[in-house]
Amino acid sequence: MDAGSHSISSGKNSAAAVQRPPLQEAGSRPYMPPLSTTSRNPAAKCYGDRFIPDRSAMDMDMAHYLLTETKKDKENAAAIAASPSKEAYRRLLAEKLLNNRTRILAFRNKPPEPENVFAADTVSSHQAKPAKQRRYIPQSAERTLDAPDLVDDYYLNLMDWGSSNVLSIALGDTMYLWDASSGSTSELVTVEEDNGPITSVSWAPDGRHLAIGLNSSDIQLWDTSSNRLLRTLKGVHESRVGSLAWNNNILTTGGMDGRIVNNDVRIRDHAVQTYQGHSQEVCGLKWSGSGQQLASGGNDNLLHIWDVSMASSMPSAGRNQWLHRLEDHMAAVKALAWCPFQSNLLATGGGGSDRCIKFWNTHTGACLNSVDTGSQVCSLLWNKNERELLSSHGFTQNQLTLWKYPSMVKMAELTGHTSRVLFMAQSPDGCTVASAAADETLRFWNVFGTPEVTKPAPKASQSGMFSSSFAHIR
């Protein structure tokens, strides 16, 4: 096949996005007007929690005078009380009341501040803390690349982003490498037509060595720094290898034959363990962050959790028993994502007849939550910096959906692809997501924000371990 027909050209999507407003500050208490005596209904009854006396028989003028009297007024009041003359009382009343239009029971000054030190500290802390702004999520792709001959097959895994910031994507029989730092594209290999097409790809932890699964059932191991084929693993599976996952020096492979095999790339007899639990093609494989548990999903609608401690007690190349066999999904289970902030939390997505994202406690096997997304779930990625989950979908919107975890409220829906979004990969800093769809385009989204801390580059010792291991085997 002509390698030139598989070119990848870059474009720029210039659609603008509107930033969402920040959360509004909580408003202050509503203003309460002072009490007034302008309207009274003596016949009205009170059903509240306050006692309101009947004032119809009260002399309000004298009551106001008694409430506002001073020391001198008290002496005058005593004189008035002793004197039978009402003229003196009326003169004093006119002087004190009619010339002073103060409203009865009205506040002259603001009420004093509360003396409770704890309440004061709470108020000041709330005033000092600014409202947290909602992160700006661009609604359009930052960059779009052409991806001709991308195989439209839900059960394959044709894209991965390595720790050295190089994206690998298989287009038909050819493996391409796109360097995110420089934006340059290179062709790693075009496999023979009898072996192709490429059916899976996965970067080793060192970001230098790449595993490629083929339709012929072979697995190739490449050194991308020198563009050298280091080793070909044969006889591992009976048919195509659609899923790959690394766990340090162990390369785990899943095939259409339903088998899952652990291959130690450091030794000649590489097949060290076999997991058998699927009756159909294994389309999803993911090791947990600790490397202690392996999740596998198959076209038989099954999800298995395998534990290293159980496998280590078995003889080499033996058949190992699963820790959990989970049958809740109603379609193929391809989308798998281990939570970065909770080691025993796994998110899984089902195919077109299922459409659900489910969350599992892998220690107990309990299903914690299930959300119907309304469309085929093709892939899942966790945000490494926030408690968020990104999913990619098929018919009808072909969108990427960002969810807030654990509420599973939709934060954003990213559209642009015109066919189902089969694959997603995450940049090493955790912020940028690449999506590849059956519309033969590769799009980059700044969906996960900006990293708070820059992660160190991978150590060279890991790379040396792989190189020395492969050297004597060849």
Image (spheres, rainbow, N blue to C red):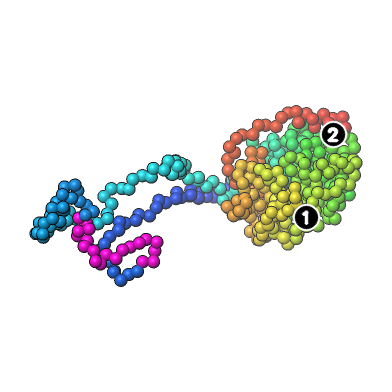
Magenta stretch: residue 55 in it? yes
Q: Residues within 10 Å of mark 1 (few under 14, many from 20)?
A: some
Residue 277 x/y as whole percent = 84, 52
In the picture provided, is 98 more to the left or to the right than 186? left
Q: Residues within 10 Å of mark 2 (few under 14, many from 20)?
A: some
Farthest bottom residue in view: 43
Residue 32, numbered label: none
Q: Nearer the viewer, residue 228 or 11?
A: 228
**Label 2 – label 1 distance at C-alpha:** 33 Å
The picture quadrant where one finds residue 420 is bottom right
Residue segment shown in magenta:
46-65
Number of numbered discs overlaid on the protein picture: 2
x 15%, y 49%: residue: 75
In percent of width and height, residue 41 lies at: 29, 69
Residue position marked by numbered label 1 in the rendering = 326
Q: Residue at x 69, y 59 (%)?
A: 355
Residue 96 image point, x, y percent? 15, 53
Question: Magenta region's main secondary structure?
Answer: loop
Determine which residue is flagged by label 2. 266
Which residue occupies 88% across, 32% down?
473
Q: Position of residue 350 (x, y in %)?
A: 72, 56
Is residue 271 shown in magenta?
no
Badge 2 element? loop
The reply to whether residue 309 is visible in this rendering is: yes
Q: Is residue 349 visible?
A: no
| Residue at the front extreme, as displayed | 82
**What amino acid type should be assigned to the residue bearing mark 1?**
Leu
Above or below — where is 92 with respect to 5?
below
**Kind of residue sitting beneath label 2:** Arg
Helix, strand or loop at label 1? It is strand
Of labels 2 and 1, earlier in sequence is: 2
